[in-house]
Amino acid sequence: MTSPVRIGELIRDRRIIVCCGAGGVGKTTTAAAMSLAAARAGRKVLVLTIDPSRRLAETLGVSRNPPEPVRVPEDRQRAAGIKAPGSLDAWMLDPKLVADGAVRRLTKSPEDAERILSNRIYQQVSTMVAGMHEYTAMEALFRLVHEGRYDLVVLDTPPSRHALDFLEAPHRLSGLVDSRAISAFLPRADSLVGRAASRVIQAILSAVFGSDFAEEFVSFLTTFTSIFRSLNVDVGEMRRFLSGPDVAFLLVSSPALATLAEAYFFQDKTKELDLPFRGFVLNRSRAASAERSMPPLEVPGDAVLSAGLGKLHALAELEQHAALRDRALLDELKKRAGDTATAISLPELPQGADDIATLVAVADRLAAS
Amino acid sequence: MLITGKGGVGRSVVTAALAKIAAKRGRRVLVTEIGDESDDYSPLARHFARARLPKQPEPMEPNIEGAVLLARTGQEMFLKSVLRSGTIARAALSSDALRRLLSAGPSFREMGVFFQLLTYLREKRGAGSAYETILVDMPATGHALSLTGLPELLLRLVPKGPIADSLREGQGYLNDPKLAAAWVVTLPETLPVSECLELIEGLTKTKMPVGGVLVNRVPADPFTEAERAALLPLIEQNAWLGAEQFQKPLLSRREIARLRANTALPIFTTPELPHEGLVDELVRVLDVAKPMPLPVGGA
């Protein structure tokens, strides 16, 4: 029997925490609070996210889309109670910039890199290659962890309909750059069958794009994929790296039925892929209000107040119902988590997490969980 | 009508409700959502008592047909129309290489979805359009923008040829405010309102006409001013249940006011319903209280 998993411990001793979840469950806020908690505990932390709301960038006082991670300004860090040796950096990733960076690193010479970066197809659609967002996030994570600048990197996975896209998408990209897929589009002389097949495909491309553009397109694909071919290795390597003991996967969910169904599916999938699933974070839970008392039904002698209390009582009953439901939900998540994972809940933040104080409050809860 | 908005705001139930309202008004409706080959989970289909939407339009209810928009389906339709032969298209698509290219190649997935939608826009039945109102439940914000931004982006690259022709034809439907509109669904809360305003900005940049905003789950305020004033000090002193619900209408009013201050678009509201996904109730509320203007449609 392993000892029960605690979120507070994950925050203090893991090197990578991956926050997954469907869109709209408060994943970015959870990831930010998680990184804040770790920095407050004295660790050097980076929170990595793609396309977050402006508000989080504003709260942390960092610009959006810088080319490299940026330090959260000293006054904000102080306000958040972060003291040396702890520190907090944030990187709101721009997929285009990360893709450009990958091209520069993977090409043999600056001239090669320039040739690709200036290709007009590359400029327009490099980020519309399916899986590019997910790949860029993975790539940045992999590189930053290897550089060893941080004790902990918290990754907020790209917004998508499915929590699983993050794990699946890089495969699409590696499928594309697999040499077999691309060679079919290039003129070939190796065999009669090969020549015939590539002629058919080129005829199709010309019919679809028009012959001028088809040529340009094939030349783009050739250069792009020869660059990203090394990625085939990376995707496998990243998977292994993400299965390691330094890593924890957390699934953020809301009490909505649809996101819960997804959460269970995600847990099964991580098992199947042998990834270290370590817990559910049930966001926007109203479970805590079950502790509160019901308002009185009336105050004799005060008609206005009594009328108000009567209405408040009806609202209180709704709240109580929701609280009990969310509490039962957390119990079920705990049961599902088993011995190797945990489940915690975070309260609904009706004002949103748009100030440091709120984030710190969430961070404290996480650290104590 | 493209129904957009971030996850968790009730976009699918709104899409379903609008479809049912349009059908009740006697329009031939096609309700669609952008799907994903890797799994067939459909939040929209639930409101039509189905587990998923069919790949080709099928009747769901009187006057309503439904179909899922899939990159793959649209790509196949496109290849068939360009190559003028189903056999060659199918043969081409059975090539592993082409399949991989189409599933990951730059903007090919969006192109597939775009073309499938275009096919339904074109479709005739008798003298008129097969579908007078087509609704698209658009997934995450980023996906919505990559679809509405697709024609501009690709036309810069591929100014002529069959792709360009389809893109221009599609633009003719989507960018004409008399024919099409995107609607943004949001909640009366801080973050959703901010993201809604960003989405409006993004859609406008892609030349997509925005019909308006639908603020979903607006909490009812049962209290009179006098009752509020009497309750407030007591609520601040006591940790009572009901306090959050008491405050919620105030936050909601503030956020709707912020929305109004930042956009000139029409804003509709729907009340908070006691359970998730009460589509019939939403239909009643939307239809009776505030009739939503449906685009004239049917070119």
Image (cartoon, coloured by chain):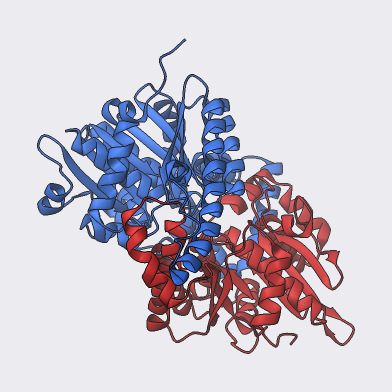
* Residue closest to the far front: A301
Residue at 68% x, 57% y: name it.
B70
Direction from residue A76 to residue B219 in the image, left or right: right
* Residue closest to the far right: B126
Q: Quadrant of the C terminus of chain B?
A: bottom right
Q: Quadrant of residue A208?
A: bottom right
Residue at 30% x, 29% y: name it.
A15
Whole-percent x, y for residue A178 in the image: 53, 40
Chain B colour in the picture: red
Residue at 42% x, 60% y: name it.
A122
Q: Quadrant of residue A114?
A: bottom left
- In this rendered view, identify the residue nearer to me: A24 or A188: A24
Using the image, determine if residue A49 lies above or below residue A311: above
Residue at 43% x, 65% y: name it.
B189
Q: Quadrant of the N terminus of chain B?
A: bottom right
- In this rendered view, identify the residue nearer to me: A333 or A298: A298
Chain A colour in the picture: blue
Whole-percent x, y for residue A8 in the image: 31, 30
